[in-house]
Amino acid sequence: MEKRNNVVTLEGNPITLLGKEVKVGEQAQDFTVINNEVTPVKLSDYAGKVRILSIVPSVDTGVCAAQTRRFNEEAATLANVVILTISADLPFALGRFCAAEGIDKVVTLSDHKDVDFGTKYGFLIEELRILARGIVIVDQNNTIRYVEYVNEVTTHPDYDKALEEAKKLV
């Protein structure tokens, strides 16, 4: 796996992200993750829609839970948009979280098994084998239109900016 130098920290400590950093204008690579029913799911399964990829380290932490709840609320106002929350949590933990929190508009997906998403999109934290926090927006033509790698993993992404970009695409 390709290592890269990033200015990303976890609780102030530098971390190493593996994989290629994706950029606006690039074609989105297909990847395979697992849904809460332990069934493989691909990005291409949602072709033809704007896809907001909400990447979180673990839904069992406060900021990740808040990020997932925020996008679940926003999903109701976005036509022809699917929001995919991706973490390295086990599918069972994601299902439990969704049931407990009433998460029913975003799709939670696990990158635990093969870390296919994390390595292809450059979000895999080498030291912990979990994903860094960020947002990637892919348009209907499979072009990456927005990317945010959050500099400090324990802080929130820029929800407003990401949602503004997504709304321009529908």
Image: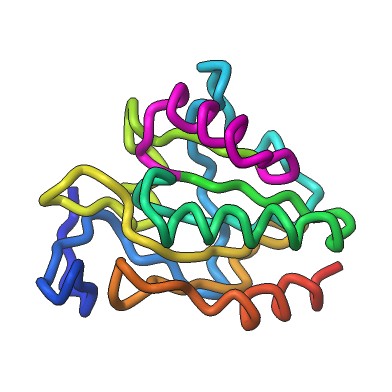
Residue 10: percent from the left, percent from the top?
20, 67
Say which residue appears at 80% left-offset and 78% top-offset.
168
Relative height, residue 154 to residue 46 (above, below): below
Residue 19: percent from the left, percent from the top?
27, 55
Work out which quarter of the rendered image holds the C terminus and state it: bottom right
Q: From which residue to which does the magenta span run?
A: 87-106
Foreground residue, 37 or 68? 68
Q: For residue 56, what is the image quadrant?
A: bottom left
Left or right side of 105 for 52 = left
Residue 45: percent from the left, percent from the top?
69, 34
Foreground residue, 41 or 9? 9
Say which residue appears at 50% left-offset and 26% top-offset.
34
Say how many tags the image has. 0
Residue 47 is covered by the magenta coloring: no
Residue 101 is covered by the magenta coloring: yes
Q: For residue 63, what is the image quadrant?
A: bottom left
Foreground residue, 51 or 69? 69
Q: In the current view of this chain or complex, which residue is farthest to the top? A: 38
Residue 5: percent from the left, percent from the top?
16, 73
| Colour convention of the picture | rainbow
Q: In the current view of this chain or complex, which residue is farthest to the front? A: 100
Left or right side of 121 for 127 = left
Left or right side of 28 for 55 = left
Say which residue appears at 38% left-offset and 44% top-offset.
60
Say which residue appears at 16% left-offset and 47% top-offset.
128
Foreground residue, 4 or 89? 89
Relative height, residue 42 to residue 49 (above, below): above
